[in-house]
Image (cartoon, helix red, strand yellow):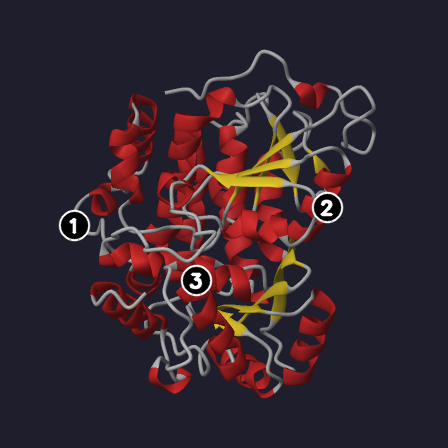
Amino acid sequence: MPIEAKTTIAGSHVNGHGLPGKAVRRRTAVVFPGQGAYRPGILQELRTASPESGAVLEEISAALDGGLDRLLGRDRDASPEDLAADAPDLLQTAVFAASVALWAARHRDLPDDAVLVGHSLGEIAAATCAGAFSIADGARILQARNDALMDLTVRDGGMVALGLDDARASALLRFVDDPTLAVACRNAPDQTVVSGSSGALARVGETARALAVPAAALPAPFPFHGPRMAPVAARHRELIDGIPQRPLSWNLYSTLRRRHLTDADDIGATLVDQELVTVDFLDAVRTLHAHGVRDFVECGAGETMVRAVRRSVPAVDCRTWDERQEHRPAPPVERSPAPDEPPEDVLDALRALYAEVLGYPVEVMADDADLEADLGVDSLKQTELLVRAAGRFGLPETGDLKVSDLPTLACVADEVRRRLDHGTR
């Protein structure tokens, strides 16, 4: 099933730097998230949400010889953490499929001059949706990346989000002094992601906690955008040789090239090259904002990237196409009885609240993660978060609670539910 193309291609009106000229005013950017941008059940929801998204998922699965069947069947409720541990290639496929299916269902109301930008893994989905590759070939590029990853002889490592700018994060890495470590992503002024071996990342976490720096492990099964990815990129390049590139149907911005791509670019090579370097999402957002983008839409599970956008540039409108996030109840403006919610909605709302305040990707807010030991949230900040949670659910302020009694997000959710059930408002 081809992705519908717009007849007006604003990408043909760019200046010599690949940025909008005076004749073009870009207003909307669609952001395709990367590692961990998956939530249980989203593919099943998209399968039935519209004929377009259902057909896209079928096409992706067919191109991968049934590669989505597990996620649409017995593993539909698997968490990103479970997939990262047990089926890392399937997690990568799930992130790609969710974004492309969402695009198929929701892109038709976009302005013709919208620009697509991917973050890390999301660059494959962005290039596919921009028309550079057919859906089937985009899936094959993704599968080639998975195959290259699974060929690694040493599958050790991951990624950690730090509540620091890139300069301070780099200084922390120099202090730890391990050759596997690298700054993987600049996401926002106050968030940098680092990658490395498991042992090196453990030392990064220990150092961060000693300095009272927020640090949280991401559900990323490999040390992406670091030195250990060199053999992966080389193998990926070999495997995608011969996959045809098509004319772009939408504007496509590259975080690696720091400009809009054109049909003259080797987009497949760009996708491979970015696997070896830092993803400078912060620079991409600031560049697009400087050239007129004010509306940012996240095309994937959750809203991690638009949260980063809000912290990076002023005066922007951000939203997500993930229906479950988009329709989440807003915080009440005054203290009043909260609406009845199923238990999982309480936990979802708390994840979103804590992620927003802490500046973390929402996917790192694991139910059983120790807020202080694992996430670096000190007791003062935990107290502030409890007060905010009380306001979110219309509960009295929580002066009678001890943060030591609520070490995890699951414990906080249980206490909120208990008070809601007993009418403690």
- Residue displayed at 62% across by 63% down: 191
Above or below, comparing residue 360 to residue 319 in the picture: below
The quarter of the displayed image where residue 186 is located: bottom right
Residue 217 numbered mark, or none: none
Tell me which label, 2 or 1, sits earlier in the chain: 1
Q: Residues within 10 Å of mark 1 (few under 14, many from 20)?
A: few
In the image, residue 11 lies at what x, y percent?
69, 23
Q: Secondary structure at mark 2?
A: helix
Alpha-carbon distance for marks 1 and 3?
Answer: 38 Å
Circle 2: residue type = Arg
Give the secondary structure at mark 1: loop
Q: Nearer the viewer, mark 3 or mark 2?
A: 3
Residue 69 placement (x, y as % from top left): 22, 42
Q: Work out how far the residue at label 3 is from the one at label 2, CA to CA, in angstroms.
A: 33 Å
**Which label sits in the foreground, 2 or 1?**
2
Tell me the tag on residue 74: 1
Label 3 sits on residue:
391
Amino acid type shown at disc 1: Arg
Viewport quadrant of the N terminus: top left
Spot occupied by residue 357 in the image (x, y as percentages of width and height): 53, 63
Which of the numbered marks, if any, corresponds to residue 286? 2
